[in-house]
Image (cartoon, helix red, strand yellow):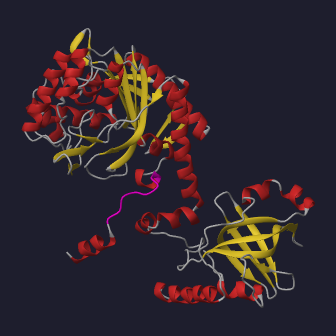
Amino acid sequence: MASQEELRSVRLGKLEALKAAGINPYPAETGKTHTCADIEKNFTVLEEKAEGITLAGRIMALRGQGAISFVEIFDGTGRFQIVLKKDSPLDYTQEGVSLDDTFSFFKDTVDVGDFVEFSGVPFLTKRGAESLEASSWKMLTKALLPIPTEHFGLKDEEERFRNRHLDILINPETRELLEMRSHFWRVTRRFFEDEGFLEVETPTLEVTTGGAEATPFKTHHDDFDLDVFLRISVGELWQKRLMAAGFPKTFEIGKVYRNEGSSPEHVQEFTNLEFYWGYANYRDGMKLVERLYKKIAQDVFEKTQFETRGHTFDLADEWEEIDYREAILKKTEIDILTATQEEMAAKLDELHVKYEGDNKERMMDTLWKYCRKQISGPAFLVNHPKLVSPLSKAQPNNDDLTQRFQIILAGSEIGNGYSELNDPTEQRARFEQQQVLLEAGDEEAMMPEWDFVEMLEHGMPPTCGFGFGERLFTFLVDKPIRETQFFPLMKPKVEKKKEENK
């Protein structure tokens, strides 16, 4: 089998042959008049008119039978067959270019992977195949490397992600998955627009990170000589400022960054949505979110029942409410409101569950994560302890619990919302508690944002906030998150070699 360098060398020779004939192998303009989808949809009408049209696309297949060549092109909308005949008039579409034998020149210089323009008339072959009989052609882009064959493709995951353009090109299932992802976010955006929410943009560089508990990426702002962080939430503290500013409904869809481990459910850069709804509480948010999830399921997937991660759930079913404290007590016999840190640690050791962080908050969260694995959903998790909900209002009848809800699907949390805390005195006290955790070495504790507390002192209306990430999409398609991203982060090849040499 020829090496990549040998294949490139052969194609470079063809590139020089094109140039020697006075042909520009990388022109900026094309005379394309129709897409492949256009001609497939309207073939009968176009054939009857017998008018010349022009198609352009990448050559995906090329085969010849002596004096005839069959070419299959792909232009992103579909595929179509082009037929070139040696005995029929065939020109090259570039002023000043005259070839003695355009048909033979095509066969000598064109390869699978090249982008080529063809002009001609639609016709049916003897076998009834819808085709375009070419009367002229034009090189649009000469490819110097071949594309993988669609039969063998890119089998290795590392190779597929590193050459994502080829993976998308030759694997229809990858293309369909990414198109579905775009549809997912389009339906989400339209839902909120139809509900009267204003789409906003908030900073991605922050002096302090807020709105979540996660390890941030840190960088330096040279002009201000200031350390800043990439955001870990979609502008939670900023969107709350907009509530105070008088916008009653806002939402944002954007990137967030968390400098944490990788898994089928976790990556460091991903897309999230957050909305904030003034004069509403967490119960209002629960009703809205349930309608949103059902809308996504029906519009994007045309179904409400899903199988994923070993679970089956139907979003059309009644959504159960699960009490955080009671669920842990039932499963582990630990009452998180009265148990000591030592008792929690002992239970986790007994269950052979690993935990990070030597504090009650982390252990409480780990106990819950142990319990949730058996819950298929759809369900609302409610009544979270205040310790694990530093931005949520307390329950009016129990100051230890909060007005928070999470969506549970297939044993995971797929969405998180609150009646947002707007008491500045209480918010300051909770931030001080988070500061203690940070100083004790808990890197995932929330950074206090004292300017935000000052904003609350000016007054913010009762507000419901909620967010979910692209994890929801990955669960509905039952794929690891990297599979559903257009370009997942990869280590540079040189780094990979260094790793192998260690």
Q: Residue furthest top?
A: 397
In which quadrant is the C terminus drawn? Answer: bottom left
Q: Residue visible at 82% across and 87% down?
A: 67
Q: Residue visible at 27% across and 32% down?
A: 211
Q: Residue visible at 20% across and 31% down?
A: 364
Q: Residue visible at 27% across and 35% down?
A: 212
Residue 150, placed above or below residue 111: above
Residue 59, placed above or below residue 399: below
Q: Nearer the viewer, residue 318 or 206?
A: 206
Q: Is residue 65 magenta?
A: no
Q: Magenta segment, which residues?
A: 484-491
Q: Nearer the viewer, residue 407 or 125?
A: 125
Residue 220 x, y percent position in the rendering? 20, 50
Residue 501, placed above or below residue 201: below
Q: Quadrant of residue 297?
A: top right
Q: How many discs mark residues in the rendered view?
A: 0
Residue 164 x, y percent position in the rendering? 47, 63
| Relative side of 443 to 158, left or right | left
Q: Quadrant of residue 50?
A: bottom right
| Relative side of 369 to 315, left or right | left
Q: Evaluate whether residue 315 shows in this view.
A: no
Residue 499, placed above or below residue 238: below
Name the magenta segment's main secondary structure.
loop
Residue 87 x, y percent position in the rendering? 87, 85
Residue 25 x, y percent position in the rendering? 61, 78
Q: Quadrant of residue 400?
A: top left
Q: Nearer the viewer, residue 55 or 124?
A: 55
Q: Nearer the viewer, residue 159 or 156?
A: 159
Q: Residue furthest right?
A: 48
